[in-house]
């Protein structure tokens, strides 16, 4: 199938290293954020979310950090594996009373053995 | 797998034609949102349906319309197709149509307009 994110910035890491993917969001009023992973030919897959009353949240091998002062999100992946290779999007929930997600441009993560 | 299913998976249409895409939401979810993802970009919000009514709309023209059925499945209709409508169309289901709940995406329908 066609590739997602042909012209996206790429982060290349060695298998076993930690990865950090960064994202700047647009709306200071946004109060809910999600990281998605998208493999070629597939829909976005939910990884982890964080609400604006938190600055850090941990999942299995993943950590999301939120810095509201500078409107910045990061996704940390520990012990990166080849299966982590994909395009990663951050999304913010736009204020307005319903789940309208605004997606960032995406970052391609390439994991090398 | 998220439990959100979309059909068809691929579709080729001619400029000016009309297309209908379908989405079945995850069990227990009553809200469906539609997104358009052009190649190399993040998904863009088209609109959302909650309890069979449109519950918010992005910056898309009226030729993009939708429906939600009593079983919460949904359709996206696009009239007068243009070449720029070629994209991956994604639906996402969530619960309750409110803010700050997880949205789970289907695999998408790849639409090519020629």
Image: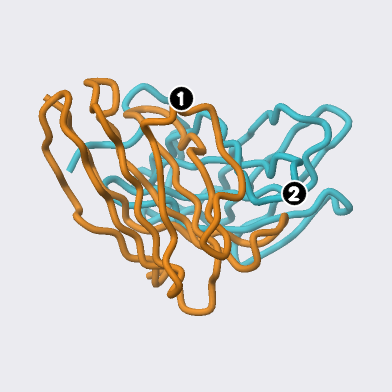
Chain colours: A cyan, B orange
Residue B20's spot in the image, x, y percent? 25, 48
What SS does tag 1 mark? loop
Question: Closer to the camera, A54 or B45?
Answer: B45
Instruction: Please name the residue shown 69% across and 44% down the image.
Output: A93
Describe residue B31's horizontal placement relative to residue B86 as left or right. Answer: right
Of tags 1 and 2, the one toward the viewer is 2
Q: Chain of mark 2?
A: A
Residue at numbered disc 2: A97
Placement of the N terminus of chain B among the 4 image quadrants: bottom left
Residue B25's spot in the image, x, y percent? 43, 68
Query: Are discs 1 and 2 both within one chain?
Result: yes
Q: Give the spatial CA distance, label 1 vs label 2.
A: 32 Å
> Residue reaching furthest bottom?
B28
Q: Chain of mark 1?
A: A
Instruction: Please name the residue shown 61% across and 68% down the image.
Output: B95
Instruction: Please name the residue shown 36% across and 67% down the image.
Output: B24
Residue A101's spot in the image, x, y percent? 60, 43
Q: Image height check: is B90 above or below A46?
A: above
Q: Earlier in the sequence, mark 1 or mark 2?
A: 1
Placement of the C terminus of chain B among the 4 image quadrants: top left
Name the image quarter holding residue B61.
top left
**How many residues crowd mark 1 within 10 Å: few (<14), some (14–19), many (20+)?**
few
Question: Closer to the camera, A19 or B73?
Answer: B73
Q: What label sits on residue A9 in the rendered view?
A: 1
What SS does tag 2 mark? loop
């Amino acid at each position: 199938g066609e590739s997602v994110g042909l012209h996206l910035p790429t982060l290349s890491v060695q298998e076993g290293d930690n990865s950090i993917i960064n994202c700047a969001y647009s709306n200071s009023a946004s109060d809910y954020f999600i990281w998605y992973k998208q493999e070629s030919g597939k829909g976005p897959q939910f990884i982890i979310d964080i609400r604006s009353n938190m600055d850090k949240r941990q999942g299995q091998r993943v950590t999301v950090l939120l810095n509201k002062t500078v409107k910045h999100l990061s996704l940390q992946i520990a012990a990166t594996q080849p299966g982590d290779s994909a395009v990663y999007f951050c999304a913010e929930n736009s204020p307005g009373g319903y789940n309208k997600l605004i997606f960032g441009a995406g970052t391609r993560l390439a994991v090398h053995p | 797998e998220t439990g959100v299913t979309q059909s068809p998976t691929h579709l080729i249409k001619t400029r000016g034609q009309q297309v209908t895409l379908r989405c079945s939401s995850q069990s227990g979810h009553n809200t469906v949102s539609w997104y358009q993802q052009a190649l190399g970009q993040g998904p863009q919000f088209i609109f959302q349906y909650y309890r069979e009514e449109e519950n918010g709309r992005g910056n898309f023209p009226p030729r993009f319309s939708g429906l939600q059925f009593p079983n919460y499945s949904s359709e996206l209709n696009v009239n007068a197709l243009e070449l720029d409508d070629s994209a991956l169309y994604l639906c996402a289901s969530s619960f309750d149509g409110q803010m700050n709940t997880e949205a789970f995406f289907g695999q998408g329908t790849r639409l090519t307009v020629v």
